[in-house]
Structure formats: C-alpha cells, structure tokens
C-alpha cells in the first residue's frame, strides 16, 4: 500500500461532495425500488459520469503512472463509488466495518486488482480512518479476527490524500466516533481482461470520454464484440484493442 498526501485540491473536493450527494439520492431511489435501502445507506455505486466534480477527478487521471507501473502495462476501471462512514450511532452500510478484501479470487503474486481510496474528508482515528493489515495480501486464507485486529494499522490523512493498495489486502473502516460522517471515493482498477462490475462504455455512450487515455481507463478499448459484424473488423476498428493483455 502507499499513501499519496494532498493530491486533490480543496475546490475539487467541494464539487465532488455535491456530486456524491446527488448520486446518493439517485442510488437511494433505485435501492428503495428494489427493497435494499437500509442495507446500503451512505453509499453510492457506479457514479461515473455523475457530475462535474466526479468527471474532473476522473479526467485528471490521478496516479495513472503509478497504477500503470503496478500492472506493468494497461489497466481499466473496474468500479467507481463513494462511501460515507456514518457515525456509529446511525445504522447504515456496515460492510466496510468488517475486515474484507475486494477481490474474491486470490491471485498470489499476480497483480490483478488495485484499490484507490480518495479521502474526500480528513481521515482521523476519531472518524474511523481505514484499517489495513500489512502483508495480508500474501495470505490465501482469511486470518483470524484476533490476528486482523492485532496487526491492523490505521491510515490517517488530510482531505485530498489518496491511498492505493493491493486488493488482496485485508482492510476495514473503523467505527466513526464523531457526530459527522466521513466521505471517501472508492475505486478499483484491474488488468483490461478482467470484467468490469458495470459496463461503463455502454452506460456512458461512445461520445463521453474526452480523450484516448480516458477511453482506455474506462474500458472502451477492452470491449467484447456482440456480433460477427463487430468481430470482423480491421485492427483500427476492433473493440478489443492491442496491448490489453
């Protein structure tokens, strides 16, 4: 894991907060429709294209060089969400409060997925800064709860800091002992052949990305053809481009 302090400027963080609030309402409406509201309170999933601030963040390609180096090649966005660690007196989305890893397939030394956590608010011991267990990404089986709690380290940082960590790393949010929620953006990136949690190119449409690098990150160069017409195309028109692994 690595912490990159003070990456995202305060003005952009303000825009992100407004966009996340709007996206939370959209996601809440869908959850209510499908009977899931109480389980996911404080969360918003797949908020790509959700507003000016979120788009600015995505288009800035924060830590693109570091993530490319980690995978030793191209990568794509697997998921993009936001999560508020609510005060412990409130009921909400408690999955993050349990130690977990965000990729279900243990990949040993093969780097399959990396997490990006963006501290939209300051992360402190009091508001439940993220707990990580160093070295646990090298363990196939889940360590005991006692070991996880004993070896966990808390990652604190100022608003705008970004934490990157191997997705096989066991981690959790700590309880928020304050009276205010603590917000973070939660993104994952994978090698291009790994299926995205949601089909972002189909969601956003072909005209959304502003440049070729953003198209690559969003998965436009690793799409699966849906017909023989899309399959039998010259290289420059193929949906799955060279160099995707």
Image: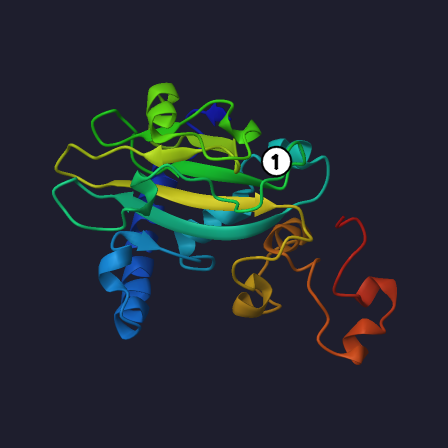
Residue nearer the viewer, 101 or 74: 101
Residue 125 in picture, x, y percent from top left: 25, 24
Q: Is residue 61 above or below residue 22?
A: above
Q: Is residue 132 above or below residue 45?
A: above
Side of 128 relative to 214 (left or right): left
- Identify the residue at horizontal 22%, vertical 34% (top origin): 175
The picture quadrant where one finds residue 124 is top left
Instruction: State the SS at label 1.
Output: helix
The residue where tag 1 is placed is 67
How many numbered badges does the structure rendering display?
1
Where, by quadrant of the figure, is residue 229 drawn? bottom right
116 vs 235: above or below: above
Rendering quarter of residue 157: top left
Q: Position of residue 61 (x, y in %)?
A: 56, 42
Q: Where residue 123 sits in the image (x, y, percent)?
A: 30, 29
Seen in the picture, residue 29 relative to 151 is either above or below; the reply is below
Color theme of the render = rainbow
Between residues 77 and 165, which one lies in front from this camera angle?
A: 165
Residue 157 shows in this picture: no
The answer, for residue 66, to whether it is visible in the render is yes
Residue 96: horizontal and vertical position, in percent?
33, 42
How many neighbours does mark 1 have within 10 angstroms: few (below 14), some (14-19), or many (20 or more)? many
């Amino acid at each position: 894991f690595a912490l990159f302090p003070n990456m995202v400027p305060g003005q952009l963080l303000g825009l992100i907060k407004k966009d996340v609030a709007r996206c939370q309402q959209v996601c809440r409406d869908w959850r209510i429709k499908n009977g899931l509201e109480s389980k996911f309170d404080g969360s918003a999933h797949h908020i790509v294209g959700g507003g000016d601030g979120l788009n600015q963040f995505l288009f800035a390609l924060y830590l693109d060089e570091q993530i490319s180096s980690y995978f030793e090649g191209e990568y794509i966005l697997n998921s993009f969400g936001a999560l508020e660690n609510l005060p412990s007196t409130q009921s909400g989305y408690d999955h993050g409060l349990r130690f977990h890893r965000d990729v279900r397939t243990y990949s040993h030394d093969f780097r399959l997925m990396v997490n990006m956590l963006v501290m939209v608010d300051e992360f402190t011991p009091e508001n439940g800064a993220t707990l990580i267990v160093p070295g646990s990404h090298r363990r196939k089986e889940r360590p005991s709860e006692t070991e996880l709690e004993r070896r966990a380290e808390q990652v604190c940082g100022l608003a705008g800091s970004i934490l990157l960590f191997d997705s096989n790393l066991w981690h959790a949010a700590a309880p928020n002992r304050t009276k205010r929620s603590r917000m973070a953006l939660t993104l994952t990136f994978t090698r291009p052949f790994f299926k995205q949690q949601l089909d972002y190119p189909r969601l956003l449409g072909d005209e959304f990305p502003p440049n070729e690098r953003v198209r690559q990150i969003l998965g436009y160069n690793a799409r699966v053809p849906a017909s023989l017409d899309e399959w039998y195309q010259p290289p420059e028109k193929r949906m799955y481009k060279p160099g995707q692994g």
